[in-house]
Image: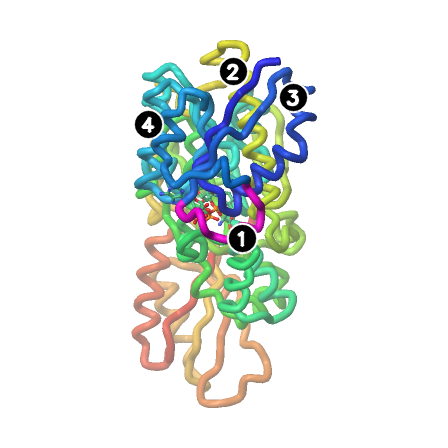
Amino acid sequence: MRQVNLGIIGGGTVGGGVFQAIQRNGALMASRLGVSLTVARVAVRDLKKARAVKIPAGLLTTDWHSVVADPAVNLVVELMGGTTTARQVVLAALKLGKPVVTANKALLSAHGEELFEAAQHYGTNLYYEASVAGGIPIIKVLREGLIGNRITRLFGIVNGTCNYILTRMKDEGADFAAMLAEAQRLGYAETPPDLDIDGHDAAHKTGILASLAHGFWVNPNQIYTEGIRSITRQDIEFASKLGYTIRLLGCVKTANGEGMKSASRSRQSAIQVSVYPALVPNSHVLANVNGVFNAVYVRGDVVGDTLYYGRGAGQDATASAVLSDLADAALDLKCGTKNRIPPFIPHERDGAVLPMDDVVSRYYVRLTVEDRPGVFAKIAGILAKAKIGISSIIQPEGHDGVTVPVILMIHDAPNAAMRKALAAVAKLPVVKSAPVMIRVESFE
Ligand code: NAP
Ligand code: HSE
């Protein structure tokens, strides 16, 4: 049986998980693939570090160069994270004609164009199933399963850490910082975790999905990104009373898929690619994706609506996705195939990302205002002048005092108009703290 020797760079949460999963199911995979996978070398930063998953000392080294260059290693697995050394690792392997498997969405977001071009140039391949949505095989779905479809809309809960925090804040009234620490302890969070809670990790993943679905490179700088740092228990409770759950959503919408409303007629062919916390109706399936679970909802013009669900972060879920890539890479090595898998970006296609200012959304707005007559009229006047319609005004009970919260539910309005109107509202003397604005996703 053909043997493929793996050089793994990184023996942490994911690297340890992959090592463990190969010990557990390597023989099963060999029987299915006709190729045996052997871990030949593992590079880590610190040989003395205590490891939850024991890796034999004889396999460990701190010298990643020697692993990549080792003639016995014919498949390199980058699981170290970061974008600087990881880029060097991947380029060094590709230059030697060695295929690379990576789980590193930050790397793909920052240097994907260069790396996929290098893979093509050196006649090898770069596999990245674990880079999006943990154990859900969403890359294979978009790249192969739905290849006969135009993707008209895609919504994803693609960050396990944020979903874990938001779920526990809603279900238990838990504290944000304590839940983030717990997500770190469980091995879900990035280093640093700001990548998760400020929405960047979800943006990296949403950009990968958007590029794959639409066949042009979505520049990460074009992805409008908001995280969950400003989401309070108060907003989670108010949203819940109104029949919504707050979730961090990655959105990829096209105008012709009825998924996107644009303020600009001339930009109807551009796609919306964005990440923001949103009020999701409790009746929608994405409102019921809890804890570390992720879900990606994809509409294809042939297949219709499809949904993919599973653990979005953590050792075993991510290891499962890496094993899927190892199988693809091992088969390519066994069969000598180079173009069996469709490329990340077909070169003949291009497209554009719609500026967020032009995107039309619905909104939840929470204001803290003086508790006296005439306040609503002042706020409504500013919104009316900006042609922004209010669908309901709610003043939650039990807030007697000098200031009171007011919730406005706002009809469809362009993001630029909404931003300007809220800036004017914030300047009113009766408004006592910065307005909170969260988009409402209707999925209509
Ligand atoms: P991690 O636990 O911090 O592991 C990183 C590993 O890389 C450690 O073993 C570290 O060595 C090693 N390393 C760092 N710098 C190195 C260097 N210069 N040379 C050799 N080894 C080096 O991180 P992780 O959670 O496994 O994440 C790894 C990658 O998977 C990241 O790109 C992440 O975004 C991605 N990912 C993670 C998850 C998840 O749930 N954790 C899910 C999907 C994708 P030491 O052990 O000696 O420190
Ligand atoms: N930090 C990431 C998350 C890991 O929480 O989703 C999985 O990509």
Spatial CA span between label 4 and label 3: 28 Å
Does the residue tagged 1 have its C-beta within 8 Å of any atom of ligand 1? Answer: yes
Q: Nearer the viewer, residue 401 or 306?
A: 306
User: Which image quarter: residue 194?
Assistant: bottom left
Query: Element under label 3?
Result: helix
Magenta stretch: dominant secondary structure: loop
Tell me which residue sits at (51%, 15%) in the image: 332
* Mark 2 vs 4: CB contact within 8 A: no
What residue lies at 54% left-to-right and 84% top-to-bottom? 399
Give the number of callouts. 4
Which of the two discs, 3 and 1, sits closer to the camera? Answer: 3
- Residue on which the image places disc 4: 92
Q: Which residue is mark 3?
A: 30
Closer to the chain start, of discs 2 and 1, is 1
Residue 304 screen position, x and y as percent: 62, 30
Q: Nearer the viewer, mark 3 or mark 2?
A: 3
